[in-house]
Each structure stands twice: as structure tokens, then as C-alpha cells.
Amino acid sequence: MGSIFSFEDGFLFLRSIQLLGIIVIVSIDVYQCYITMLTEIVEKPGLIRSGQVSLKVNGNPVQLNLLPWVSLLDAIRDHAGLTGTKKGCDHGQCGACTVICDGKRIVSCLTLAVMKDGSEITTIEGVAPEGDLHPLQKAFIEHDAFQCGYCTPGQICSAIGMMKEGKAKSREEVKELMSGNLCRCGANTNIIDAIMEVQNQDAHE
Amino acid sequence: MEASQKQVGQPLSRLEGQLKVTGTAKYSGDYQVPGLLYGYVINSTITKGKITRLDTGRAKAVPGIVEVFTYENRPSLAWFDLQYADMDAPPGSPFRPLQDEEILYNGQPIGLVVAESFELARYGATLVEVECEEEAFETDLRKEASKARSPKIGMATMLKPLPPRPKGKFEKAYQESPAQVSAEYYHGTEHHNPLELFATTTIYEGDGKLTIYDKTQGTINSQLYVSNIFGLKYKDVRVISPYVGGAFGSALRPQYQLFLSVMAALELKQSVLVTLDRQQMFTFGHRPPTIQQTRFSADMDGKVTAMNHLAIGETSRFEDYTEVVVNWSHMLYPAANTLMQYKLVELDVYSPLDMRSPGGSTGMHAIESTMDELAYKTKIDPLQLRLINYSEDDVSLNRPYSSKELRQCYLQGAERFGWDKRSPEPRSMRRGNKLVGYGMATGIWEANQLPAKADAILTTDGKLRVNSAVTDIGTGTLTVMTQIAADELGMKIEDVEFLYGDSKKPFAPIQGGSFTVSTVGSAVKVAGAALKKKLFSIAKKMKDSVFSKADLKEVVFEDSRIFLRSDRSKSVSFLEIIEANGGKPIKVSKFSVPSLLKQKKYSRATHSAAFVEVEVDEQLGIVNVTRAITAVAAGKIINPKTARSQILGGMIWGISKALREETIQDFNLGKYMNQNLAEYHIPVHADIHELDVIFVEENDEIVNALGVKGVGEIGLVAMPPAIANAIYHATGKRINQLPIHFDSLL
Amino acid sequence: MNNFDYLKAGDIQDAIGKSGSCTDSSYIGGGTNLLDLMKYDLAHPTTLIDINHAGTQDAVTETENGGLRLSAFATNADTAWHPLIEEKYPLLSKAILAGASAQIRNMATNGGNLLQRTRCYYFYDANVPCNKREPGSGCSAILGYNRIMAILGTSEHCIAVFPSDMCIALAALEATVNVEGPNGPRSIVFADFHRLPGDTPELDNNLLPGEIITSIDLPPQGFSDNYSYLKLRDRNSYAFALVSVATGLELDGDIIRNARIALGGVAHKPWRVPEAEEFLVGKAASEENFAQAADIILRGATGYQYNDFKIELAKRAIIRNGMMALHPETQLPGALPSA
Ligand SMILES: Cc1cc2nc3c(=O)[nH]c(=O)nc-3n(C[C@H](O)[C@H](O)[C@H](O)COP(=O)(O)OP(=O)(O)OC[C@H]3O[C@@H](n4cnc5c(N)ncnc54)[C@H](O)[C@@H]3O)c2cc1C
Ligand code: SF4
Ligand code: FES
Ligand code: FES
């Protein structure tokens, strides 16, 4: 499988376009070696001890050796190499970094990786089985529910979390409970349309 | 049926959609290479003065911190202003990061900490000791308004015409008219705040070669900037930017993270990622605060007799950033007497920078609010007043429009909105404890085209590949260009590949001003046409060619084949042509240049009409835009789905500008106080209600070969005044300062 | 942000012990406020003691007197959506749900919510004078852009606002905060928990060093028939209150038997004036009576130029929320004004 995670690949985006239609998921062993490498960099004398953090990311066990000051977001991106989760503010103000942690949507920038030791994390890369799309992902494409796409991973993870909570029924309730995810491109109406469509489908099943 | 026009006009879903919804689309901060270093910027905490002491010792002593760059140890670099000037640089002297000890504005980058991890770099930034000598500063536009002066002229002003010359005798005509309105308008600073943080990953390739993943609206712009400043060969600097997490003008100019990332990579001979944090996103360009005064008059039939519009905008001390603010009213309304003035005030801030619908959204707010007042003065329905003053021509320049279906925008928009249900008196409509108001406004934006180049290649597997350096900032460029190319050659979308976002590819200008489709689309079209010609000439020379006697006009391109028009049973497939070409790909390169001679005789503009319903809580002043419709005349719409999204996005920006966003300035401190997304309020989902878009048919054979005009800005311009007008209609209160806070309606 | 040692507390005593044995330590709950401050370089603990597992994360237990006990370690979301809270203390549920975002409420703990710090712009900018951040340095807000600042209970040293929504409801409900510390457990009535700035603006509340909030008790009266939380802000969601009101009424027909009104966004602590509540007892639940109560509540309110509007806004909000409490069924998501 063509891995998106090839370090030296300067032509990556060309490949990405060729791979259109194929979901590319990072294979765990590829980033595992990266993690080991980073750990060596980080563990320097004089600073505070790093510790082992075990996470289950998208179903795959991941062992990270991290200093306490690494946020869950940076652990996912810089250490586990899953860059689908985005950083838009690093202060809980935008929702771009939303992931699902032990079944609940959270902003990964405002928690520490060490605090989530033992947790199960689902990121955008893992919301659907490999090679498949989650109904929300399909609906987002169909409804043109993004422009630049930067808020999209967070919007989708957040919507999955919201639907699991089961508290939002009406469109107004969905809007309120999705308000923790900003979209600067102004795809708001299309995003809510996409979510409502999936939510209504689910309701009929 | 003609083979062409099959893809163009289709509501195709974005081709990069899968990559974006699965998190596989990579933005400029998503490239991780072995040994990547992280840079964190240190910013000035004073507004003006000099650095008197710098101590980086503590930071450098921390293991894992590789280097701290400041003006004291930065490499010596290019000397001339021109070398720092990018494609969008206003007249003046561009800001040079880490140039010297001078502090020109609050938040100015004064250092870069480079470390082995992001956390270490960020920590290091807190350890650098900086002492400064502060000088007096001024950041208050309104306080300094009396110092307004005329702007300097330069390259960038080419696309930004000065106000038109005065016409007739404004003062006299105004005084003698029975209906007069005059008003003052103000909006404060706004920051683009794309959701993506500005990031540049510079990959150090060795041998003076760099591959740079930059957040930019112009790969070639960044490439030239880097090459010029760091004295590198153009071919050694490759800037790649396929996915841009929103920009809205903020990435029209190379920002300082690019400079710092490249500088560090070159000095350290390692790859470096510099990402700005959200606070730092407020330390470069912004929409300038602007004061406007209007004086419009009309006769009692509603004919506008005289218009005076003065705008005073903010600029920095080092560049004269200008906008087109006051030119629009006379492009719309044929008053015989006009006086348009535009001035600047220098302040101790960073240079402003084009932000979605720059100038247009500012000017139209004042113009269309003033027109609304005039409607009440003359007791004429606001829509009727626009129709009374409708002009087929651009009277400001005495020339016709290449096309103008604004009248249809007014009529179709009004019809779908139900404008006829509006009762004219303010405060006369309500719903429960809410006052209801209807407001409308006109929108206008220029339809420009710039030169650009594209390659078109028929690959050995019979597929089409089109190349351009252009970016796709979320506007749908990839999809739209693919559609244009597919139609030009009569191919299926799946068989066409558009490669973009790479400075190695053929030239495209910066992506902004709603001119990308007309500019790059035209290049794609001419490249496609040239490729057709070449394919045909090869096909003609093939052994026993069915086309031996035909010329290009007698064939059609369809289904990846060339057919003889008169006898469809005769055709040659692209694969056969490749075979005839010895199995080699067939490539053409083509520059598209706007036909200036033809265009010069016309004004070219996009138009719109926005209709807005607001509900205002009578007791508490809370405003909701409950319904809005924008009818747009923007020439041919290549992709109604992505174009609609552009307009919706623009409308939401309009709601934001009218009711939400503002950068709060503290003039005592000379700084912005809400440099974060918790207090810089952009709309949340709960703020956005029913929105609708109408594309009015508009045929334009002059504007460019595609007949397209662009939809990036037009969705925004009419919304702020339409909302302000609706609020007036609901409450009887005219609030001329944006954003309109609900407490101003108490 | 500086690095720090990270310790996990197994139970409350363990947490208190760990806190006692290191200097500059901080407890961490959800981290949504503390990490925010640390990233802005405004808080610099050298040890973080994770107390998420120090007590029960089950949000709610019933108490003997017929009230409920909220775990300090439960999340805001689990609390707001707990069936017992939704049923018996809907005012609290609504107030919590009006705060922050769904994601943050899934992280934020009840204990942390009580201790969140002000959102004053100047407090958040480490490079400008602020008495709360740096006692004695001055207050930049008084003469600065003070739109979001306090109108009640201010001092010449600080005009900051306490930003919590949850706590406004807790104040109205007369909750009690249970804490444990190096000197043993104690309970603090809600009105005494948060402080006014006075000349010690650096202190937000009366928690002592090393003390840990373990739970919050709600008395039996939950005002579940007539209640309303109204939050007025610069956008419809995901923004802090400029003014918020928590109102609980006990009615006998039209006549008010018991009333609670607490204001948020106007002071350094949730603002309650018992005199105004007493005034309402025995009176009809009408706009006029709520207006008079509002006048009592807002006695002595002062604006600082950009926040002058809050005085009139607070008055109207009290009146409106009183009327909204009569029709809780019509309330809208996000504590927006309803009919
Ligand atoms: C973008 C954004 C928007 C927000 N909007 C709102 C809003 O609209 N309304 C609102 O009310 N809130 C809002 N919040 C604030 C949010 O509610 C608080 O951050 C949250 O409640 C804090 O809880 P926490 O568990 O995360 O606290 P932490 O960050 O973990 O801790 C905060 C403080 O409390 C201490 N602490 C925590 N738990 C205990 C305990 N049990 N005993 C003793 N000390 C303890 C910590 O040491 C720390 O000093 C917002 C936050 C963000 C980031
Ligand atoms: S109001 Fe309080 S928190 Fe804000 S600047 Fe003044 S002292 Fe600091
Ligand atoms: S990056 Fe976490 S909320 Fe913005
Ligand atoms: S799609 Fe660009 S921010 Fe939402």
C-alpha cells in the first residue's frame, strides 16, 4: 500500500492526487520507527523525566515515550505521525483538534498525553474502516461541507461524538452542540446539512 | 450536440474531497522529515522603540535548543527593498524580519528559537531576555484622522485604481437637491484568521537547494521572495503548497514564518518547521480600520444628483497600503456630480493586507447604507430606488459593462425573498417579542484577468495532465480547472489530472481578488486548445488518416477521441495518436494574456443583490440574521456547487463583519487585546441560519474566453449594508459602526 | 510553557500529600483552564498532580437530606446530562450547557470549573500591568477597553469578572462546596466561596493552599418547575457571558413563594442580593416586580465606559429571565433569550 508517510517524499501531493479514491492510512510500523527516533531527541539530561504513554490510536496500540508537557494533540501529530488532526489555536478555542477519547469528543490541545495513558483515541484517520468512508465523510463530500478542509477532521470527529451523545435532535440543537467547531471558510450551512442528513438516516434505521 | 460544455456547469463534488475528509490532505505544517527542527518565534512586547539588550544565553544552554536567531546573529542578506518586495507589496519599504534593533510595531518578530521539539522551542522563547527602549507611538486612526494624506503610487496600485476625477459641481448640486443624506461610518481592524496556523516547513536538500512547504496564495511569489532575499537560484528553490487551510488574503504576501524557516534551514543546514501560534496570527497583515463620510443627494423622484464619498484608511509607517473604497458608487449610480476622496493615516502598526473583498466591502457598507437612508428620505422603496438609478454603463469611466445582469439579481432576489411583503415603516414588522426587519443592498466587485501559463500533456496512457503553479485555497480551483480542461479536450473528469500548488509548474499569479478562474482557467483553456491543435496535426499525418482533408474546424473532440464532424463513424482515439507519436507523451505550454485591447473598452464587474431578514429581540437587542438571499451575476458558473459554497462563505463573512468580528485595540498600549479565537468572534454554527444563493444567467464574451468573472468576494460585499439596513428597518436605529454590537440596540 | 513533573494521585489523601511535598505544584482536573494558562506562560507549576482518579468520576449521588452531591472530579457534561440533574436541577444543567463547547464540557471537571480564572484581556497578556497577575503592577483594564469587565463589587485594584456559567446556577441554588486539605475537611457555602477583588485581586476564592475540592452539595430545592438561565454574549454560542442570569422561582399560582436570582458576567463572583429575592416573596411574577428586584440587585453598579451598557442590560436580563422562568418549556438551546 502506498503510505502517505514517506519522509523524503517531496512529491507527496502529486501522489496524493494520484491516490485519489484510495484512503491512505498510516501503517503503524512506519511511524513506530519515527517515534523511537523522536524519543531519543526529546530525552535529554537536565530536563524532567519522560515516561511511557500507552494509547490505543484508531485501534492500534501505540507506545510513546513522552515528556509530560506534550499535549495529546502534539503527541498524535508529532509523535504518532497522524497529521490528520489539526491545530488551529492550541487553546481550546476552535475545535480543529477534536478527537474521540474513550468514546467522547474532546479538544486534544487542552489535555496532556500523559493524562490519557491507557485511553482509546479515534482520530479522523480511524473513523471508518480502511478503504471505506464513514457516512459523515460521504455526506461532507456530497454537501460540499468544507472549502479549505482544515476544520473538517475536527468537524467530523465532533459530529460523530455528538451523534453518540444523542442529545441533539433538531437542527437548532445540532447547531448549538456543533458550535465548538469553528469554520472560517463559512461552510457552516453545508456542514449542518451534511450532519442532519446522516442523523436523519440513522433515525430511520 | 457539441462535445464541449459537458463538465463545465456541472455541480461536481470537490475532487480532493476524499483527502480532506480523511485527514490525508497535507498542509504546510504536516510534513515530518527525519531530524526536523522546530522554530518558535519571539515577538516584541512593545509598540515602538529599540532593543537595547538581548540575552539568549539561558535559552541556548538548554539541551535540545539548537540556536536562537536575532538581529544580532542573523546572516547578512539582501540589501535592497526591491529584493524584499513580493507580488503584492504596496509602495514603500517592505518589512524585513530580524533586520535590526528597531521595533516598528507591537508583536514584531524579533527572534527565532530553533529546537529539537516544538515544546522546547516554545520554552526557549520564554528564556530569551529582551530589554527595550520605548518610544512614543500612535495607533488610533480616529485620533489621527486630521493627519490623513494622499497615498503614494506604486506597482501594486496598478490593480487598485485611484478615485475617479470629480465630476460636475458636487457642492452646489448637493445643496440644491431636495433630499440629502450625510453620514459617517467606521469599522475597526479585522484579522483574516484562517483556521490553519501559518506554517512553513523548509526541507534542506543540500547544495543550496530547498523544498519549501509554505502556507501561501502564490507558490511563485514565495519562491521569488526567498530566492531574492537569500541569494538562491530560482531553480533551487521549490515552493509547494497544495492544500492551504484558508487564507482570505493573508497569504498573498510571504509572511515572516517563511523568512525565518528558510533562514534557519540555510544557517543550520537542516530542515526546519516554523509554525505561528494564534496570537502571532495577529502580528502581520489585517483589514485596516477605516473612517468614511458620505454625502448623497437626490431629487424627489429618487434620481441621485450628487455623491461625495471620503475614506480615510490606516497604513503602516513603512508601506502605503491602499484599497479601492470610494470608486464603487459611481460605477453603479449615474449621478452628474461626484467627488471621491481617499486618504491614508500612518500609524505604528504592521501594514494592512488585502482581506476578503478588500475596499469593496468597506466602501459598499457606506454607499449602500447611504442609499438606504436616501430611500427613506425620498419615501421610495429601497429596491425601487436602486432601479430608478440603474445604469447599464459604468458612468464613472463612461464605458459599457462587458455584461451586467444586476437588474435580474434585484428582481430574482426580491422575488425569492418575498421583498414585496415588506412594510415600509421602521418597527412595523414583528414576530412575537422580536422586531423583524428586511434590508437589501447592492454588491459589486471587479472582474479582472491576469496573465498566466499552463502546460497540457497527453500522457502515454491517453490521459490529460494539466500543470499550473496556482494554489487552491479552498475555492475549488482543482475541481474547476479539471472541468475546464476536460471539456476543452472532450474527456471524462477521471481522465484529467490537474497538478498545481508547486512553483516548479508554469507561472500563475497570486490567488486572490476573485481572478483565479479567469486567469488560470484561461491559461488552461488555451493550453488545452493548443494541445488539440497538436493532436489533430499528428492525427492528420497518420497513415491513411481519416482527417487528411479536414481542418480543425471540421472535427470534434469527444470521449478521448477526435471525430469527423460530418461523419461520426470516422474517428481516431487519443491512444492511437500517442502511438503515432512513437508512444511518447504530447506536451504543449501556453501563456494566456488578457486581450487588453478588447477589454479596455469595457468595464468588467461582478454584481449582486443581497436581501436579508433580521430578528431583533426588542428587549435585549440580540440580532439574528434569520434569512438571507444573495443573487449573483458572475458570468458563467463553472461549478455551481463550489461556486455556491464560495458565495455562502462570503455571506457568512458578511454576517461576521456586520455583527461579530473585530480586533480590539488598546490605544494606550498600542496593541491588539483579543489575539485569540475565544475573543475574536467569528460566527459559530449557532449564528448561521437560512442562507440561499441565486446565480443569475449572464453571458459575457468580452471578459475572457470562458465568460467567467469569479465568485470569491462578491458574496460578502452586499451583506454588511443589507444587514445594517435590515436592523434599521426593524428598530429604527441606524448603527454605522461595525460590528454592530447588540448593546447598541438597547 | 515550562516543563514539569507529572504525578498521578490515587486518592484524595495521596493528592494532598503530594501537594504538600513539593513547592509550586498544581492540581490538574480537565486541564482546560490550567493548560491554557500554562501555554500562555501565565501559570508555571513545576509539578502537576493529576487528581482525575483521586475521587469518583460518577457525577451524582443522592444525599440523605434529599439533595444531591456532585463529584468534583466528574465532567461538566456528565453532570449536566445526568438524569437526576436534568430532572431535579434543570437550572444547573442549562447553565453548564451554556458554557464553553461540548468538547470542553467533556473535559472540564466540576472542581476545575469553580476555580477557572478570569478572561480579562489584560490578565491574559503577560506583558501589561495587571494586579491579579502581578499584585501592585496596576490595572490596565480600568482605563482600557473594558467592555467585558465588572460593574458590581469592583475595587480600584481590579474590575475583572468571574467567567463561569455553572457557578451562577450553583450560587442561585445555594450549593455548598466540600473541600479537604492538609488541615482536614471543611464545607464552604457557595456565597463565601468566591471573593471580591478588594485589595487582594490575586485571590479569586477562599480555597487554601493544598486544599482540594471533593464535592459540591445541592440542597433539595431545585426550582425544577420554574427556572431559567439566560446568557447574553457577543455570539450565540462558545463565548463568555457579558451578562447572564440564573433565576429559580417557587410559585403559588401567580405569586412568588421563593425566589433566587444570581448574575454572571458582572462581578468577580456570582452576584446575589438576598434582599431582592425577599422583596419578590409574596409578589406577583410580573415584569414590574422583576424590574424592582433588578434595581435592588444593581444598586451601586458602576460602569467603566465601555461596559456602561451592562447596567441597563443586566436590568433587562433580570426582568426577561424572570418571565422566561414562567415558561421553562419554551427555552432554547444555548440559553438564548426565548419568548
Ligand atoms: C475556549 C474556552 C471557552 C470557555 N467558555 C466557557 C464559558 O462560556 N463558560 C464557562 O463557564 N466556562 C468556560 N470555559 C472554561 C471552562 O469551563 C473551564 O476551563 C473548566 O471548567 C475548568 O475545569 P478543568 O477541570 O478543566 O480545570 P483545570 O484546568 O484542570 O483546573 C483549573 C484550576 O482548578 C484547579 N483544580 C481543578 N480541580 C480541582 C479540585 N478538585 N480541587 C482543587 N483544585 C482544583 C487546578 O489546579 C487549576 O488551578 C471555557 C474554556 C475555554 C478553553
Ligand atoms: S481587571 Fe483585574 S485582571 Fe484585569 S487587568 Fe485589572 S487587575 Fe488584572
Ligand atoms: S487547536 Fe484545539 S481547539 Fe483549537
Ligand atoms: S473549511 Fe476552511 S475552516 Fe472550515
Image (tube, coloured by chain):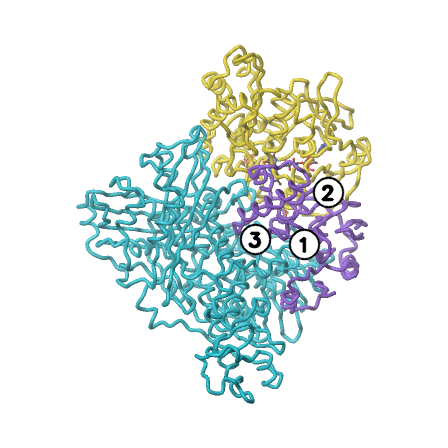
Chain colours: A purple, B cyan, C yellow
Q: Is residue A91 above or below residue B424?
A: below
Q: Earlier in the sequence, mark 2 or mark 1?
A: 2
Which amino acid, by three-letter code, is at mark 3?
Phe
Would you name the residue on which mark 1 appears? A133
Q: Earlier in the sequence, mark 2 or mark 3?
A: 2
User: Assess mark 1: CB under 8 A from ligand 4?
Assistant: no
Q: Position of residue A129 (x, y in %)?
A: 73, 54
Q: Is residue B576 left or right of residue B88?
A: right
User: Assess mark 3: CB under 8 A from ligand 4?
Assistant: yes
Between A131 and B257, the one nearer to me in the picture: A131
Query: In the picture, residue C106 is in which quadrant?
Result: top right
Observer able to see residue C134: no
Would you name the residue on which mark 3 appears? A146
Would you name the residue on which mark 2 appears? A103
> What residue appears at the point 74 percent right and 65 percent down from the top-left corner?
A1
Which amino acid, by three-letter code, is at mark 1?
Leu
Query: In the picture, residue C268 is in which quadrant?
Result: top right
Chain of residue at mark 2 = A
Chain of residue at mark 1 = A
Give me the C-alpha separation between circle 2 and circle 3: 25 Å
Q: Position of residue C300 (x, y in %)?
A: 48, 22
Is label 1 in a helix, a strand or a loop? loop
